[in-house]
Amino acid sequence: MPESVATIEAMVLETFPVGLLQCNCTILGDEEAGEAIVIDPGDEIGRIERRLLELGLKLKQILITHGHIDHIGGALKLKRLTGAPIFLNENDLPLLERMAEQAEWVGVPTPETASPDETLADGANVGLESFPAHVLHTPGHTQGSVCLHFVPLKLLIAGDTLFAGSIGRTDLPGGDYGQIIDTIHSRLLTLPDEIQVIPGHGPVTFIGRERKSNPFLQPH
Ligand SMILES: [Zn+2]
């Protein structure tokens, strides 16, 4: 279909690590519509804003996979610069109250945060009209962790739930090892092999590769 080809040609998909903990921040844009979303603007907001300006894209949504400082730390700053609303699953609101504590763990100044404008509820649809995403609530790393499944793009933005060859840590407040293993099996490994995964840190991978070789996910 020519229309979908034109859409893919107009797609901007850029992922780059930001901040001390090198959180993967993603810009997904539609050059035809002149619109974009940003996922996990943890830090380096000036760089993110500059890139949006260079691309000529207006920011529509700021989507946060979970409430850890390295993923949400720059969200309010980006909202103030662009006017875009912030989306976060409500189960991570308690982590926002602990931002000073989180900053201390990492050894960075406490960023200013605010309540999100919208929740990222399980089953909700977010993203751009041309590049919609389905929200999968995947608790375990934190209670409000979500993955964003861009179904037509065969793409999953996984936050800190699933990494290439690893899974998110569960020793921080709100973490639960049994829960993250369950949620990865029931919500993520049920997706097709060819789904590309952009994790919250480190290199991209695929659902099929993780199902086959991730040491945390093998049957016993
Ligand atoms: Zn995290």
Image (cartoon, helix red, strand yellow):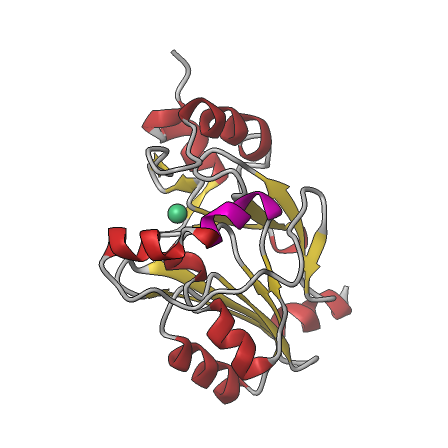
Instruction: Please give left or right for residue 171 compared with residue 188 in the image.
Output: left
State the extent of the magenta-drawn residues as a range.
Answer: 90-96
Q: Residue at x 59, y 32 (%)?
A: 187
Q: Is residue 98 visible?
A: yes
Q: Is residue 70 above or below residue 13?
A: above
Q: Residue at x 67, y 59 (%)?
A: 118
Q: Is residue 99 magenta-colored?
A: no
Q: Position of residue 96 (x, y in %)?
A: 47, 54
Q: Position of residue 120 (x, y in %)?
A: 64, 51
Q: Residue at x 65, y 53 (%)?
A: 119
Quarter of the figure with residue 6: bottom right
Magenta span: predominant SS is helix
Q: Is residue 114 above or below residue 80?
A: above
Q: Residue at x 57, y 87 (%)?
A: 56
Q: Is residue 196 visible?
A: no
Give the farthest residue toward the top.
220
Quarter of the figure with residue 170: top left
Between 121 and 14, which is closer to the camera in this rendering? 121
Instruction: Please give left or right for residue 207 compared with residue 151 in the image.
Output: left
Between 191 and 23, which is closer to the camera in this rendering? 23
Between 100 and 77, which is closer to the camera in this rendering? 100
